[in-house]
Amino acid sequence: MSFLVAAGPGAITEREKSMENVVVVVGGAGGIGAACAQEFRDQGRTVVLVDRALGHDASDPDSVRRALQDVPSVTALVHAAGSVGSGGIDGLDLVQWRRVLDDNLTSAAVVSQQVLPRMPRGGSVVLFSSVNGRHGGNRLSGPAYAAAKAAIIGLTRHLAKDQGPRGVRVNALAPGPVSTPMLHRLSETEIDRLRAAMPLGELTTPEEVAGTVAFLCSPAAASITGTVIDMNGGSWMG
């Protein structure tokens, strides 16, 4: 992409203008993250991706710092990265446990730590919990995933209280089954069982999630912080 320099004293470049409205999307190379990235691009916002597929480790502060070294200001952060496990506590695999917690929870904390100092008043953060973090999950995704996604809710509320005086809002989404590769790893029978537990009976699309994320990052949500929005077709109504 090329940038034009405006004429006249004190003029700023188009690049400088674009950097005034930057959205960082973690996990933006696929699934929900890719849909969020496209939603913000369609709004004309500059999107910066942090993703393992691009060589980034979102749970490593040095890796995140390098990914953001040319990004002085961030108006919105969307953390949509994560991974699932499987099984129950009887077969607990500590390697899997640590990986799932790092991918979902540690990375959210690390990226928030790196981005929030770059975020001015009016900024917005959206983290991703899950219906599994609401109702305890199951053996399809495992205990680590349920624990990590429940902890995301606690992290969201902590950050909302901590950053509120700065005028920065922090919220979370807790989707149910979303039609992404993370869900497609399951068999048709398993997916049908999940769908049957949803009063609406339909899987959520990544674009639906992205639309809700965009709302949370918009002026229309200026008074919303510390909130968890459930998008699960009615499978959990707590």
Image (tube, rainbow, N blue to C red):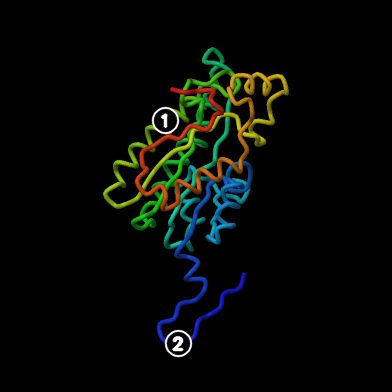
Q: Residue furthest left?
A: 165
Q: Residues within 10 Å of mark 1 (few under 14, many from 20)?
A: some
Q: Amino acid at mark 2?
A: Gly
- Mark 1 → mark 2, Cα distance in angstroms: 51 Å
Tag 1's secondary structure? helix
Q: Quadrant of the C terminus?
A: top left
Q: Image quadrant of residue 179? A: top right
Residue 78: image x %, image y %? 49, 47
Q: Are marks 1 and 2 in contact (CB under 8 Å)?
A: no
* Residue 217 in the figure: left or right of residue 232: left
**What residue sits right under mark 2 in the picture?**
8
Please name whichever residue, 87 or 140, is drawn nearer the observer in this view of the structure.
Answer: 140
Residue 47 in the image, given as x and y percentages of width and height: 54, 57
- Amino acid residing under circle 1: Ala
In this view, 90 is above or below 64: above
Depth order, front residue of 221/125 = 221
Residue 182 position within the rendered picture, expressed as x and y whole percent measured from the top left: 64, 33
Q: Residue furthest bottom?
A: 8
